[in-house]
Amino acid sequence: MVMNTAEAYAQCERVTWEQARNFAYGIRLLPPDKRKALAAVYAYARRIDDIGDGDLARGAKAERLEEARQQVKALVATVNGEDATGRLDPGDPVLVALADTGKRFPVPLAAFEELIDGCLADVNQAEYDTFDDLLYYCRCVAGSIGRLSLGIYGPASPERQSKLADDLGVALQLTNILRDVREDFRNNRVYLPKEDLDKFGIEFAPFGQPEPFPGEAMQARFANLVEFEANRAREWYGSGLRLLVTIDRRSAACTGAMAGIYRRLLERIARNPHAVLEGRMSLPGSEKALVAAQALAGFDRWKYRKGARE
């Protein structure tokens, strides 16, 4: 059965509103055509993430991710006017919406392959010796989404703006890594670079233990590490948020809302590092709505525009 394009977009939006959490506050600020397109991008990114984070065996995950890679190649072919018959399911709402998005906007759909590369690293339980190693991963899983989004916003200077979108993605992913230390450990993953752990004298417990750090002394060192990583993330926000003055007001509001929520979360983590070892931290809905309202009013965009003039 061939999926109707309008219904395909509607299903992508339902996925976004139900599962995007922080991102939904920003996406809703876009005009309808861009909102639907970004929902399609999110829905497919979510599908890839769910493969990597799911309960399948490692080999099965890798196989599913490679199948997704072939879907991406078929999507690119379709957008380029090539025959992709039999390579894409015409009844898959996410693929139908994404193919239509690729024809309407200059979205670099091939960037999904970088997201797949990042998820494969997760599947293979990659470790990161240095920050440069982690930086590559962040650009794969988060910078790629920034560049895909930029295609929907409408880049005026693609090369420069792509770099800024990439930087903002790094900031968001660093915030995620700090927020999810406990959850990631329980999934046998450690993203914090070994060089940073060694610098602060931190050693994780063996995988399979209920908590990542044994003893109060290690937790005290963890607080120092969090401040170090939070400062690093702040620098990436400072660079990435310059993107706001290069895109239109509604696109800037969308990006500013998403980034604003994560920045507030980062500051909350920095004030109380031990809280991330007790459970998943998040902002209340009322605070997220306030951040979205401020983004729509253009607070951050005005600040960065003013800074660029000075």
Image (cartoon, rainbow, N blue to C red):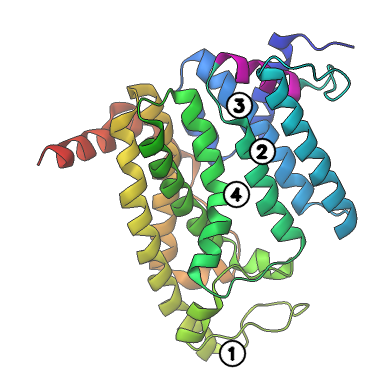
Image depth: mark 1 or mark 2 in front: 2
Q: Amino acid at mark 1?
A: Gly
- Give me the disc on residue 215: 1
Residue at 57% from the left image edge and 14% from the top image edge: 104
Q: Earlier in the sequence, mark 4 or mark 2?
A: 2
Looking at the rendered structure, the kind of residue marked 4 is: Val
Q: Main secondary structure of the magenta part?
A: helix
Label 3 environment density (alpha carbons within 10 Å; few <14, some 14–19, many ≥20): many
* C-alpha gap between disc 1 and disc 3: 44 Å
Q: On the image, numbered disc 2 is attached to which residue?
A: 45
Residue drawn 66% across the image and 15% down it:
100
Task: Name the foreground residue: 221 vs 96.
Answer: 96
> Which circle's residue, 1 or 2, is located before the other in the chain?
2
The x, y position of residue 280, in whole percent, is 59, 59
Report the residue marked by disc 3.
Answer: 39
Q: Is residue 127 left or right of residue 294?
A: right
Residue 193: tell me if it is visible: yes
